[in-house]
Amino acid sequence: MNRLPSAAVLPKGTFSDEAARYLFRERDVDLVYCKMIADVFKSTAGGKTDWSVIPIENTIDGSVSLHTDWLVHEVELPIRAEWVIPAVQNLVGRRSELSEEAASEDGRGWDPAKIVKILSHPVAMAQCYEFIRTHIPHAELETLSSTAEAIRTVQDNPGRGWAAIGTRTAAADCGLDVLQEGVTDHDNNYTRFLLVGHQVYASDASTMQKTSILITLPEDYPGALHQVLAAFSWRKINLSRIESRPTKKKLGSYYFWIDIEMSLDTVLLPSAIAEIEAIGCQVRILGSYPSFPFEG
């Protein structure tokens, strides 16, 4: 009997979990939940799962450096797909515990004064800083390894005036209430996810193909970065992202992660890469893959 394909993902009820369910909404895939991002990568690198679901970039916080470094330095997992979805965080708790008549004056149905502690992942907490400062400035803030863990901690500590910032999925799983939806400080808060693994992700739904490469410049070639960019420019190849990160070999040594809005199965892109290699640059192909727009 053939087994279902599988994907490693951060804990059930996290935003990564919601992102995985969104990508695989029309196909049967077993989701294997892991506590830490290292476990997610190792699950696929070790052959226990076919793919890993990796949050890689956010419109508010930028690139997730830890996850980028894992893909570059720790594992050899090709990028198979990317997709972007809105990162909606919610204030979660027990409405019966945090409500009283005075709370209904502004229509909330919960009383900010009764919240003594807010728990969440540090990134989610930072994305909701203005909401917390404006409405619940007195609350103690505690960060945990995931939004799902924060919500479970609130579930396990009734009667203490605790609330969490996290997903609707985790709130429902833990039998808690969404006290207020959409508490992120920016409406355009989107997160980009990568699907990485040795198995191809086949789909006809994408309208865009992208390629990601890693370039290390030669140390004895002044102006090498200009030459790299020129190889793309004169061919009119659009770069959607370029980011430098330390090679971890010595101070001042960097590689460049470049996302290109073109498939590797073209004439122009391979010739651009060949030109870049001709000046002594090292080029590593991270993946050529479909890019899925959000359909909400």
Image: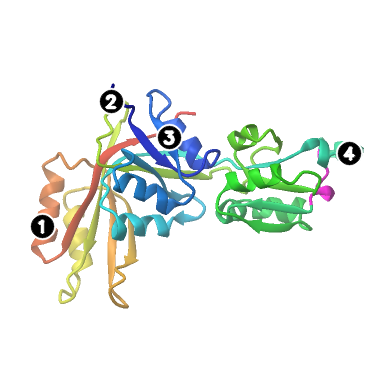
Q: Nearer the viewer, residue 7 or 164?
A: 7
**Residue that carries the numbered disc 4 in the rendered image:** 100
- In which quadrant of the rendered image does the N terminus lie? top left
- Which circle marks residue 275 in the picture? 1
Q: Nearer the viewer, mark 3 or mark 2?
A: 3
Between 179 and 188, the one nearer to me in the picture: 179
Choose the circle earlier in sequence order: 3 or 4: 3
Between the C-alphas of marks 3 and 4, the distance is: 40 Å
Give the magenta part as a residue range: 110-115
Question: Relative to 52, is 124 on the left or the right?
Answer: right
Q: Is residue 290 magenta?
A: no
Answer few, some or many: residues within 10 Å of disc 1's Cα (few below 14, many 20 plus, some between 14 and 19).
some
Name which residue type carries label 4: Glu
Alpha carbon of mark 4 to alpha carbon of mark 2: how far?
52 Å
The residue under the point 52% across, 41% down is 15
State how far apart marks 3 and 1 are (Cα): 41 Å
Q: Position of residue 32 (x, y in %)?
A: 43, 38
